[in-house]
Image (tube, rainbow, N blue to C red):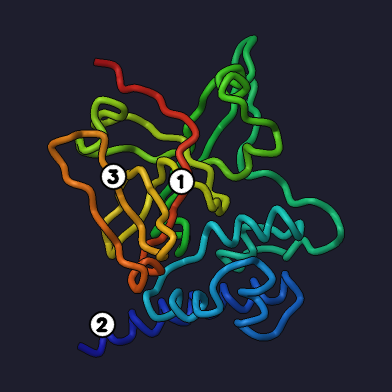
Amino acid sequence: MKILSDEMDDKRALIQAIVDRMKTAVGVTKDVDLAEAIGISRTQPSVWKIRDRVPLPECLAIAEKYGTSLDWLVLGRGQSGIDGSRAEPTCVQAPLGDAMYVEIPAFDLPGYANGESSQKWFRVPRTWVENEGLQDSDWFALHVVGNAGNNMSPTIEDGDVLFVDRRPRDVDGMYVVRIGDAIRVRRVQRVHSGALHLLNDNEAYPAEVIEAGEAEGVEFIGYCVGQFHRAR
């Protein structure tokens, strides 16, 4: 039991350290001021700590707006990069033969948060990224997520690769979300009451309704902006 307690304490310390670096990057000292500065609920920083959730989308937004190193924000590695210059984008162009490619990191939250697993990348032609309407300034926020299951069939099939924009959005649409320990792909509809409707494209699966009082427990991993179909 003590080992489990120590692990929980370590995770909470990790989240607290990330929140502290976020406040440093934004230039505030209080959690509520951080929430106000980045446009989230005043209670959200406390939710991150209670639920041991790494606030990656919010860190990405801070990295873009304040020119802060994402490695420093999330991992505490290197320098903050707060020097008036822009941080380097997460996605990079890489030459391969006569074509230009973009390498996009795979979403791997546990490994990314504790640094125990190597960074994984997914390489796609730059022309594909441009055809999807994504600009150079958008690449830093892209991650790829492998879809499992057929709840979004026929739009998204089991094994398809999804491209998600990690920046926070307020629009309805298709998202990768986390509820508890489960990561899901759903069409999200926001209701005036504050509730969320999570819809499946496969009619065999019913919609889920997340009431307003529980909506803050839904973590938005990213907005789906494209996909690669698995070869069949």
The residue mark sitting in front, 2 or 3, is 3
Indicate the position of residue 142 as horizontal and vertical percent values.
55, 41
Q: Earlier in the sequence, mark 3 or mark 1?
A: 1
In the image, farthest residue toward the right = 84
Q: Position of residue 21 (x, y in %)?
A: 64, 74
- Which is more N-terminal, label 3 or label 2? 2
Looking at the image, which residue is at 42% across and 28% down? 227
Depth check: 23 or 194 in front?
194
Q: Which mark is residue 199?
A: 3
Report the mark closest to the observer, 1 or 2. 1
Residue ID at (51%, 47%) = 171
Amino acid type at circle 3 is Leu
**Which quadrant holds the C terminus?**
top left
Numbered tag placed on residue 195 in the rendering:
none
Q: Is residue 95 left or right of residue 118?
A: right
Count numbered badges in the picture.
3
Q: Residues within 10 Å of mark 3 (few under 14, many from 20)?
A: many
Task: Using the numbered discs, state the Cα–Cα distance from disc 3 to disc 1 in whole angstroms.
Answer: 11 Å
Q: Look at label 2 and name its amino acid.
A: Leu
Give the quadrant of residue 79: bottom right
Picture layout, residue 143 above or below residue 198: above
Please tell me the numbered disc located at residue 172. 1
> Which SS class for mark 3?
strand
* Image coords of residue 193 (percent x, y): 40, 65
- Observer-nearest residue: 4 or 197? 197
Decide: few, some or many residues near mark 2? Use Cα within 10 Å; few <14, some 14-19, many ≥20: few
Q: Which residue corresponds to the image point at 26% horizontal and 34% vertical from the top-left? A: 201
* Pointer 2 residue: 4
Q: CA distance from mark 2 to mark 3?
A: 36 Å
Amino acid marked by disc 1: Asp
